[in-house]
Image (tube, rainbow, N blue to C red):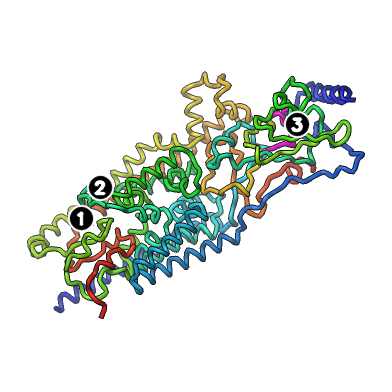
Amino acid sequence: MKEKNRETSRREFIRKGARITLGLAAAGTGALALARSSLGKDTVWQIDPFKCTQCGRCADECVMSPSAVKCIHAYALCGYCDLCSGYFLPGAKLETGAENQLCPTSAIQRKFIEDPYFEYIIDEELCIGCGKCVKGCSAFGNGSLHLQIRHDRCLNCNQCAIATMCPSDAISRVPADTPYLIKGDFTNGVEG
Amino acid sequence: MYGKSILISLLVLLLVLLAGDVNLAQQRFPKPEFETSYVQPDPTTPEPRSAEMGYVDVAVLLAVLSLGAWLALRKRSRTGILWLSVFSLVYFGFYRNGCICPIGAIQNVALAIFDPAYAISFTVLAFFLLPLFFALLFGRIFCGAACPLGIIQDLLVIRPVSLPSWIRKVLGFIPVVYLGLAVLFAATGTDFIICRYDPFVGIFRMDGKFLMIFLGILFLLLGMFFARPYCRVFCPYGLILSWMSRFSKWHLSITPAECIRCKLCKDSCPFDAIEQPVEKEYRTPEVSRKNLGRFILYLALIPLLTLLGGWIGSRSHIFLSKAHPDVALAELMISHPELKDDPDNLDIQTFLQSGKSFTQLVEEASVIRGRFRKGSMAMGGFIGLALGVFLLNQVVFRKREDYEPHRGDCFSCGRCMEFCPVDKR
């Protein structure tokens, strides 16, 4: 009986030692993670419009269908051109018929403001984030159309599926309190 | 009027093209001065889920774990655990879309340790640590009461079959490799494979790639017969939890009082996690001595296996490093130089336009490969060590006299408690 007690207490001692070791290991891993980086704010994913090369993968790689990436319009940068290279197919008639439009889903509305200016508005319900208009606008226009991750749609996956496929490394984690990188109000050599 | 504006636009365009500087793309066309009362709108910026909600998630997790521990250890209520698990499935699964979860948080912690630029958030760290500490105190409460991935499989257990123990043990070794690879890929900034191959997140989101949904449904169908297949064969966090739970201070017990060895609970566990009493003939001094010999042998094997694992790991670092996009791109451009002229190869074309030189890319890739060499060696060593401890564990002499849950394997679902006829009084 005595021996049995000793056996039990020995086992209990080993268990206790292992428990303390494992507890310290877990706490140590957490502490190491903090020490090696820092305790940061929660982050969200966002596209740097100055790195984006409009490859079109945002439309396909997002876990959401349609993608959480949409085109947004930084109006402050727009030239309100009649001949908008983000709106019209190259060489098309300057009429609003779908056959003249660059956007595959006709998600850009063109509105007459005053002669000769037109406003271009993105219909987010229709936009699929393909970036065709962004390519057109960046190539010949001011680059006021650009892609952003929309946080009402983004699920904030632990690892953004688009970010791993982005050929220009344009998608990164940004602090959740500054969730957008919009051209114009975003200081990168561009005046708003 | 129309023609004039087109003409102006074209002229400006021509000038820009002649200037030939694409970098000056911004504000080629000056902002108009409107004569009408047109007010320029601002782009909308819908806010993300507020950071404070992360604290709510942590509080919910803490509450679920505490309640789960109380239900499993004190109240001994299977029904209570079942309803709590349904709540967790709805909250962490369908409401939070299966993201944030401690399984994936392994990778965030690994990335935070090896990439100083990555700042880990309080929420992620709390999600990683809380279930571990609960496992040290009360067993794998997280698996039974909180984990949406486990619970969605648990609710669909219909006719569980029992597999031979050697098959279970071999399959149970897969999480070791999965954990090693996940940490390696996260630490090198390659990918978060646990999240990429999470089979149920597509079901929680009700949206996703075909492969994801297909895997999820496959696991659920398989789980009707082989209960909780993801937890038992893949889950890397379950592996860490099982280490913790083996040495837990308290644990769910099948019987509220003294076990009468009636065997009624034996078939109640769909996960084969109930261990039988060790029979008399295995409790003799001869068996004990034989086991001691094997114990010493396996103990001596551990350093050998660790070294062997490390060697195999470092040998495979070139292969493993190909998972990193930069290494893959550099390799592709070296092995297929003709692809530089392929306009359809987006990765290469984007790289060529980026202005970065090829030498720079190769240098970066070789730095990453160097990290992989160390990381793969550590991963191999870890797998070897785990194999050694696993072997050693097979010959540890146990004097079990009652039916008990296996503390490492038990998910604390509480099914067995209902089958015990012993009255608490």
**Residue type of the residue flagged with mark 1:** Gln
Q: Which residues are magenta?
A: A135-146
Q: Is residue B155 visible?
A: yes
Q: Quick check: do tags 3 and 2 share a chain?
A: yes
Q: Chain of mark 2?
A: B
What's the distance in space between the residues labelled 1 and 3, CA to CA? 69 Å
Q: Residue at x 51, y 25 (%)?
A: B333
In the picture, measured across the screen, residue B188 lies left or right of residue B228, that is right
Residue B170, numbered label: 2
Task: Give the residue number, with chain letter if any, for mark 3.
Answer: B25
Q: Residue furthest bottom?
A: B425
Where is residue A40 drawn, in percent x and y? 58, 57
Which circle, 3 or 2, is nearer the viewer? 2
Q: Residue at x 30, y 61 (%)?
A: B410
- Quadrant (top left/top right/bottom left/bottom right) for the N terminus of chain A: bottom left
Task: Give the residue number, with chain letter if any, for mark 1.
Answer: B394
**Residue type of the residue flagged with mark 3:** Ala
Where is residue A114 drawn, in percent x and y? 88, 35
Compare marks 1 and 3 and give the one earlier in the sequence: 3
In the picture, measured across the screen, residue A93 lies left or right of residue A130, that is right
Where is residue B34 drawn, in percent x and y? 89, 39
Where B257 sits versus B241, above or below? below
